[in-house]
Image (cartoon, rainbow, N blue to C red):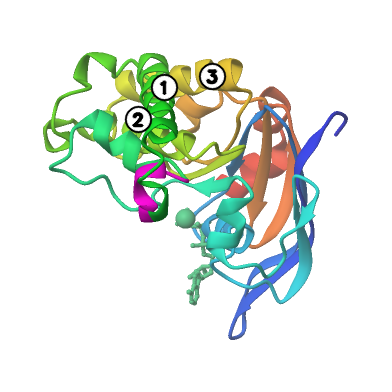
Amino acid sequence: MAGDVILHTEGLRKAFGGLVALDNVSIDVERGSVTLMMGPNGAGKTTFLRVVCGMYKPDAGTVVFDGHDITGLKPHEIYKLGLVKTFQIPLPFVKLTVLENLLVAARDNPGEGILKAPFRRAWLKKEEELVEKAFKLLELLKLDHLWDHPSYGLSGGQMKLLEIGRALMTDAKMVMMDEPISGVNPVLAHEIFSRLLKLRKELNVTFFIIEHRLEIALKYVDYVYVLDRGHLLTEGRPEEVIDDPRVVEAYL
Ligand SMILES: Nc1ncnc2c1ncn2[C@@H]1O[C@H](COP(=O)(O)OP(=O)(O)OP(=O)(O)O)[C@@H](O)[C@H]1O
Ligand SMILES: [Mg+2]
């Protein structure tokens, strides 16, 4: 793949006992892209995501994110470099409002550092900036009208949008999501993807998405990787991949 690669994996392998869940998986994700990983049940998609985010250590291979070799780093170390998996960050505090849920997700929230409390002016300025940033994200997610609603009142789909907003409050360069539209009705599922495209355009953030619902997801993504029984079966633009006889066969 041409262009600026934000995530590169080389020869990733992960076995559970005798079961090889990932076998020699090498991919490149272009910066600013929306990249999909698809494949039948048990193909190794979730395992791949967990290895990349540091939740599992690979048996072999390397992961390079934004120029850093992150192979074997702990999840919080990887998160600090700007690679965030949604649903890895704590679930929204249901009693907090939508806006508060974004503010607590921001990293280096200055109000947290008791030593900095005396520097009230700097602190207030930073708070102001965070509120501004949160509102900008809420507008892009079309959740701004709900800013002072407690998050327990949100629908399932809105909750997923809030999770994405929380990931972006951390200044994530790349957001990884495992089945972000599962359980969401088709109309809202399309909405979620079109809002992702808007976020990508505005913030140049990269999205890496695992999804089963191809009839929805394929319309919105730039590039697709297909996993099957731990192997990379094929890759390409959505229209190329979907016509590949090997993909059709893997799904049958
Ligand atoms: N922690 C684990 N211990 C043992 N086996 C595991 C573990 N995690 C995954 N596996 C096995 O590894 C294989 C790949 O699983 P994985 O969850 O990565 O697939 P998937 O592509 O995400 O599937 P799905 O589409 O159903 O979510 C499966 O055979 C699964 O049973
Ligand atoms: Mg899975």
Give the percent coordinates (x, y) of residue 199: 51, 20
| Mark 1 vs mark 2: in front | 1
Pointer 2 residue: 161
Q: Amino acid at mark 1?
A: Leu
The residue segment tinted magenta is 108-114
Residue 129 in view here:
yes
Left or right of 13, for residue 51: left
Tell which of 54 and 210 is nearer to you.
Answer: 54
In the picture, which quadrant includes the N terminus? Answer: top right
Mark 1 lies on residue: 137
Above-or-below relation of 190 to 72 = above
Of the numbered discs 1 and 3, the one sitting upstream in the chain is: 1
- 242 within the magenta span: no
Q: How many marks?
A: 3
What kind of residue is marked 3?
Leu
- Within 10 Å of the Cα at label 2, are there few (<14), some (14-19), or many (20+) other Cα atoms? many
Residue 227: where, in percent of width, then height? 65, 51
Tell whether 87 sits left or right of 30: left
Q: Pointer 3: what residue?
A: 197
